[in-house]
Image (cartoon, rainbow, N blue to C red):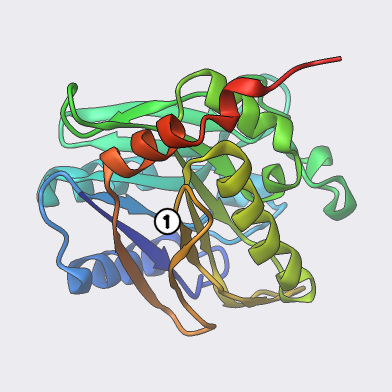
Amino acid sequence: MKAHLVQLDITWEDPSANHAAARHLVETAAPEPGDLIILPELFATGFSMNTSRTLDAAGATHAFLQTLARDLGVLVQGGRTIAGARLARNVMTVASPAGTIAEYAKVHPFSLGREHEHFEAGSEVVTYPWGPAAAGLAVCPAICYDLRFPELFRLGLARGAEVFALGACWPEVRQHHWRALLIARAIENQAYVLGVNRTGSDPSLRYAGGTIAVSPTGEVLGELAAEQGVLSVEVDPGAVRRWREKFPAWRDRRLP
């Protein structure tokens, strides 16, 4: 099983351009049927608070994810803006060749960036299956600022997560936090962590990429610098299970 982490230089508020760029990068990576594709947070628009413009109201980005999954026979996880009950929602939508199988709304809006004024918080941690029922993996999606809250990952672990797939628009100024926290989340949950960041710049911020894949033991399996591209890594379902059995620290969690 392979995961393909797509580090995209997002064109600001231009879904058509970003759909085309993402498809080109994915096709260049030559995924095989059954592989997992992970795109950044709000990959079709960038981290824009202009939700009246970026809302996927007509479903173009949703349709793109579904079409890409169907055309290539893969799972695709990608971020988009949808309508919520009161404000917009920053979500990761997961598409399979048969249709949408999961959707996760970001639980932790980035208040310093005033995201909470435009996006309402999600309230549920979700998982989805990747691979055959008997030999596949449970994947827990997460979004950017969620990375700073280890309790969310513990909830994912309690729901059976063996892989955490996080898409982000994580700014260059705090890039050293990005890498350290992703490795920590892998070690403490004894799980694969696949962190996909954007690169390039938007009207307010610069992004340094740093897309990274980390093993359940904390080993860095692959990493990108700031260039646009795809990081493709092998993910072994047996590795996470063997490590958890050999060193079952995850079972010793206690709440005071």
Residue at x 29% of width, y 51% of height: 235
| Viewer can see residue 164 | yes
Q: Position of residue 112 (x, y in %)?
A: 89, 52
Residue at x 27% of width, y 39% of height: 238
Residue at x 49% of width, y 51% of height: 217
Q: Is residue 222 left or right of residue 100?
A: right
133 above or below 38?
above
Residue at x 58% of width, y 21% of height: 251
Q: Quadrant of residue 52 in the image?
A: top right
| 242 and 92: which is toward the camera | 242
Give the class, few, some or many, for how many residues have Cα within 10 Å of label 1's Cα (few <14, many ≥20): many
| Viewer can see residue 57 | no
20 above or below 61?
below
50 above or below 56?
below
Q: Is residue 66 left or right of residue 89?
A: left
| 6 and 80: which is toward the camera | 6
Q: Would you name the residue on which mark 1 appears? A: 39
Q: Position of residue 149 (x, y in %)?
A: 75, 39
Q: Is residue 28 left or right of residue 239?
A: left
Count the labels in the image: 1
| 202 and 108: which is toward the camera | 108
58 above or below 151?
below
Q: Amino acid at mark 1?
A: Leu
Q: Position of residue 160 (x, y in %)?
A: 45, 22
The quadrant of the image that shows the C terminus is top right
Q: Position of residue 80 (x, y in %)?
A: 50, 45
Q: Residue furthest front?
A: 246
**SS class of the residue under badge 1?**
loop
